[in-house]
Amino acid sequence: MSFWEQLKQNVSQINNSLQTNISKFKNNEFAEASMAICALIAAADGTINSAERQKTAALIVSNETLKIFPALELKQKFDFYCEKLSQDFDFGKVEAIQAIAKLNKKLDQGRAVIQIGIIIGGADGNFDSDEKKVVKEACHAVGINPGEFDL
């Protein structure tokens, strides 16, 4: 069974695990990286439209793991990365990946950000190739082998 199929079966287990450990991740770098990967997922195909943005924002707000952060703070960070990606996708992507890369010495936090990206990407039941590609790039940014996530 692939990692993705296991993930679909165990999303609540992953969320519970993240919630258990998330309190130690309550810092600005983790919040930035989490919103950067969410924006990358929303814009994975190279563009970001208002429907994708709204759908992803709703998923962020409903994600139990991210409730340790004030919703307004997350919205501001998510909107920041979405605007960067909308204005110039390539440079916006570089900036988002740089935010994620700040966790490269903090593997537990980097792994949690990758898991958030996978959960957000798969929330619609279709973790597509564009979404997998940006998550794979995020894995490289934090020094985690994408194979760990079957990418």
Image (cartoon, grey):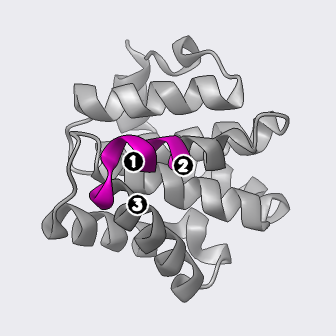
Please tell me whether residue 92 belongs to the stretch shown in magenta: yes
- Give the spatial CA distance, label 1 vs label 3: 10 Å
Question: For the point 67% across and 22% down, which residue is it?
Answer: 144
Q: Is residue 112 left or right of residue 47?
A: right
Residue drawn at the location 67% of the way across and 75% of the way down:
68
Q: Compare marks 2 and 3 and give the one earlier in the sequence.
A: 3
Q: Secondary structure at mark 3?
A: helix
Quadrant housing the N terminus = top left
Residue receiving disc 2: 95
Separation (CA) of disc 2 from disc 3: 8 Å
Question: Which residue in the protein does label 3 denote?
Answer: 84
Q: Which residues are magenta?
A: 86-96
> Which disc, if any, is residue 40?
1
Q: Is residue 73 visible?
A: yes
Badge nearest the viewer, 1 or 3: 3
Q: Is residue 46 magenta?
A: no
Q: Nearer the viewer, mark 2 or mark 1?
A: 2
Q: Secondary structure at mark 2?
A: helix
Q: Secondary structure at mark 1?
A: helix
Percent of width and height locating residue 131: 31, 35
- The percent position of residue 106, horizontal first and vertical second, equals 83, 39
Q: Quadrant of the C terminus?
A: top left
Q: Please, what is the dominant secondary structure of the magenta stretch?
A: helix
The residue type indicated by label 1 comes to: Leu
Q: Quadrant of residue 139?
A: top right
Q: Position of residue 66 (x, y in %)?
A: 58, 68
